[in-house]
Image (cartoon, coloured by chain):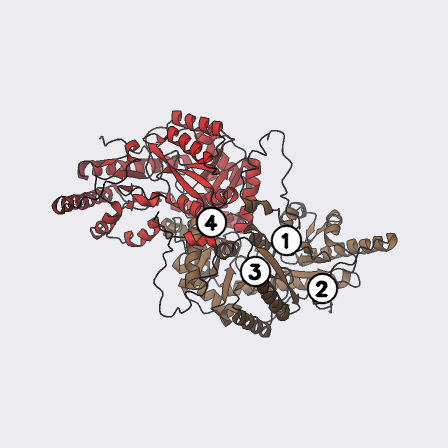
Chain colours: A brown, B red
Amino acid sequence: MRQSGAVSLPEPSRRDTRLDTYVDAYAERTHGLTVSAVRALFAVANRPEVVSLAGGMPNIADLPREALGLAVDRLIREQGTQAMQYGSGQGELFMREHIVEVMAEEGIHAHADDVVVSCGSQQALDLVTRVFCDPGDVVLAEGPSYVGALGTFRAYQCQIVHVAMDDHGIDPVALTQAIVTLRAAGKRVKFLYTIPNFQNPTGVTQPVERRRELIAIAKEYDLLILEDNPYGLLTLEAEPLPALRSMDAEHVIYLGSFSKTFAPGFRVGWVVAPPAVREKLVLTQEAATLAPPVFSQYVISSYLEQFDWRGQIDVFRAMYRARRDAMMEGLTENMPADTTWTHPAGGFFVWVTLPEGLDSQAILPRAVSERVAFTPGPAFYADGLGSRNMRLSFCFPTPERILEGTRRLGKVLANELEMHRTFGLHDAPTPHIELQTGPAPNTS
Amino acid sequence: MRQSGAVSLPEPSRRDTRLDTYVDAYAERTHGLTVSAVRALFAVANRPEVVSLAGGMPNIADLPREALGLAVDRLIREQGTQAMQYGSGQGELFMREHIVEVMAEEGIHAHADDVVVSCGSQQALDLVTRVFCDPGDVVLAEGPSYVGALGTFRAYQCQIVHVAMDDHGIDPVALTQAIVTLRAAGKRVKFLYTIPNFQNPTGVTQPVERRRELIAIAKEYDLLILEDNPYGLLTLEAEPLPALRSMDAEHVIYLGSFSKTFAPGFRVGWVVAPPAVREKLVLTQEAATLAPPVFSQYVISSYLEQFDWRGQIDVFRAMYRARRDAMMEGLTENMPADTTWTHPAGGFFVWVTLPEGLDSQAILPRAVSERVAFTPGPAFYADGLGSRNMRLSFCFPTPERILEGTRRLGKVLANELEMHRTFGLHDAPTPHIELQTGPAPNTS
């Protein structure tokens, strides 16, 4: 995210003389509101001639729409008066029971009472932050981390402290150091936010041994872990790994979502938390929205009951595997020497580290002129790092488009390097403390 | 709402030794979280043998479910990849255009850009409060006011100041006094929250002349008005009145909803605000949920395009008119002498003032034993008033059940009065400052 706290507003139109009417009336928490770098990018990157490797939209074209339509038709006819009515502030019981079944795939044993359904897992993240964080509290996050989470933590005026990653995820030594240092300085460290599987944006996954280390640290330092797992079932190679929550129910609050394993448009996610936390989450949700979308819960539950949802995930996995492979091939063929990238075994994203001297934010406008878009690294940091990085997504474009995108990107980067050599435009070396523990060099 | 700030938690079960694990970790804002009196009631009142006059659920049995099922089937088949995908943080353009069309029925002229779609109008209320209110800021509200709004204002640690109503709504003299007094005491009065049509819980509507007075006060004192209008089209007698927002676009932020005019289960509401406010609302919503439910917006838009939605509202009005009439008849026949109540010309609710000495909260358990439920008045106040009041809803039970409910309630109240006479249980007179400007005596 941008370092400045300035609010980016659009140009006022002539008819709006009152643009400043409320300027003194806003709450303090709005002063840090900035347009998400990712979202501002979408307007540009979504033109059809641009190959966008910037977004995170799942490809849902393979969903069985004919059969779904019939199922929802029947749902409305037979259960419409319940499905279209107000519902429970914790989410419908049958939905929570289905969620328990889905979570069992990753080793989690929970009870339907432990689950709170929310308007997407983004809202679950928002509710947890709202329940735990006062202004000035510290949230630990991987460096880099999911831009939507950084925005939420910022909205609650938290201080975000990034912890270095290596190619097995968050570095336990760095984590321990961060906890000790912050607490010695009198800071309240509320939780560690982590995406253990196919992390957004790096694509890195924590192996089981690393998960055990994290749980041990959580126990030793009485640290709450907020585990966000939208991609865990979208493995492209092995079977899903056990969730952190399956290894410890006391120190882990778990966030799940149907957005990537089914579809995002229904806005149904969930959080699994201990009872006292869960009660506060439900009360907070009721004050925010009364209840999560009821009709959507009926649709998703019907889907889980009547369709082979595991088979559908296998269909998605095959489709994403082809796209991931195209991305790996395209990067290998087209990236300049001294470019490195991660090798995700699932999920949607690759994290690229550019050669010394290149700045991904500066390059982006030129890339868009060449009709390819990506998300620059700094979007995923609260502290200004990441300017040598890009996040590339392979979830939405076809394999052919992905290859074309990497070709265009390769040309853009080659031009950039040429300019640097010709004009001697060597920026001061980018701080790369976190890069030394960064992802492994490319191998293919 | 209860005066105490205690959090009401359920009894811990034996297996939960960790109930207190996080007791020191919660944010300050959670200390005021209380279980809503209304919601806690529902568990009891929803038993089938109880006539519940307590809830606020619209009766949606008359929706054309067969035709709706076919329409949604076609939506999924033909537009499923867009309808089930991530969407705009402001809400889909076509949804906002439909909303503009719906608002025109109440005289509002707005542009689709002015509209922000949210996860129900409850979330719109939450976003506006989040954008404007710091802890300690004052929010003015009618006395009494909607329990869900009080919960939201409390969740943001606002100080709620009630302003007296008469049978034409909020009292302009009391409002002016409140503004002047609070500002002289150095308080920041962020907005006046008002429900001008068929107010929840009193059923009172502000006539046009009163609306003009409120707008004049808003202009003179530079006061922001937050107009919440879920019931405006559910008139049972006359045509809808012009919204406050139609009389002033600068001082009024408008909240709307499809929950009562179509159905609640889709969670689609909206807010109309000036551009600078709207930008902050969108950014805040994106941090909270990414976007309002997309699939729901496609369903509601299809409904508005393909169905006679105005005709459907007429069907609802006739149905609610019969229920309102049954309630008026039942109250007239069954209430003890010295009971008064409002005469709503629309909406869902009647506000009853009990004879001197009766306490609605104390009566409620006895009423439920006699298989009738209502919502006690104090739920709708932040300051402990309302113990002589009950809110009765006529939206959900059939006319026959409503009559039966008023019979049961009449017996309960007669018993209460008998007990008071027999045992001399005269409580100290309930503070009735607001009752002297309260609703008109019953006429029928």
Q: Chain of mark 3?
A: A
Is residue B204 placed above or below A153 in the rendered structure?
A: above
Q: Which residue does the numbered mark 4 point to in the structure image?
A: B73
> Looking at the image, which residue sits at the far front?
B185
Residue at the image point whose x is 62% and y is 43% from the top: A7
Q: Are marks 2 and 1 in contact (CB under 8 Å)?
A: no
Residue closest to the far right: A422
Q: Is residue B71 in sight in this rendering?
A: yes
Tags 4 and 3 on a common chain: no
Residue type at mark 2? Leu
Q: Looking at numbered disc 1 in the image, what kind of residue is underneath it?
A: Gly
Q: Secondary structure at mark 1?
A: loop
Counting other residues with Cα less than 10 Å from the Cα at mark 1, is it few (<14), some (14-19), or many (20 or more)? many
| Mark-to-mark CA distance, 4 and 3 | 54 Å
Number of marks present in the image shown: 4
Q: Residue at x 39, y 54 (%)?
A: A88
* Residue at the disc numbered 3: A187
**What's the mark number on residue A435?**
2
Whole-number angstrom distance, CA of label 4 to CA of label 1 = 29 Å
Q: Does label 3 lie on the same chain as label 1?
A: yes
* Chain letter of disc 2 in the image: A
Asked if the residues shown at circle 4 and circle 3 are in contact, with their CB atoms under 8 angstroms apart, the answer is no
Helix, strand or loop at label 2? It is loop
Category of crowding for the residue at label 4, using alpha-carbon neighbours closer than 10 angstroms: few (below 14), some (14–19), many (at least 20): many
Dot 4 amino acid type: Asp
Say whether residue A358 is left or right of residue A264.
right
Q: CA distance from mark 1 to mark 3?
A: 35 Å
User: In the image, residue A375 lies at what x, y percent?
Assistant: 67, 53
Report the Cα–Cα distance between label 2 and label 4. 50 Å
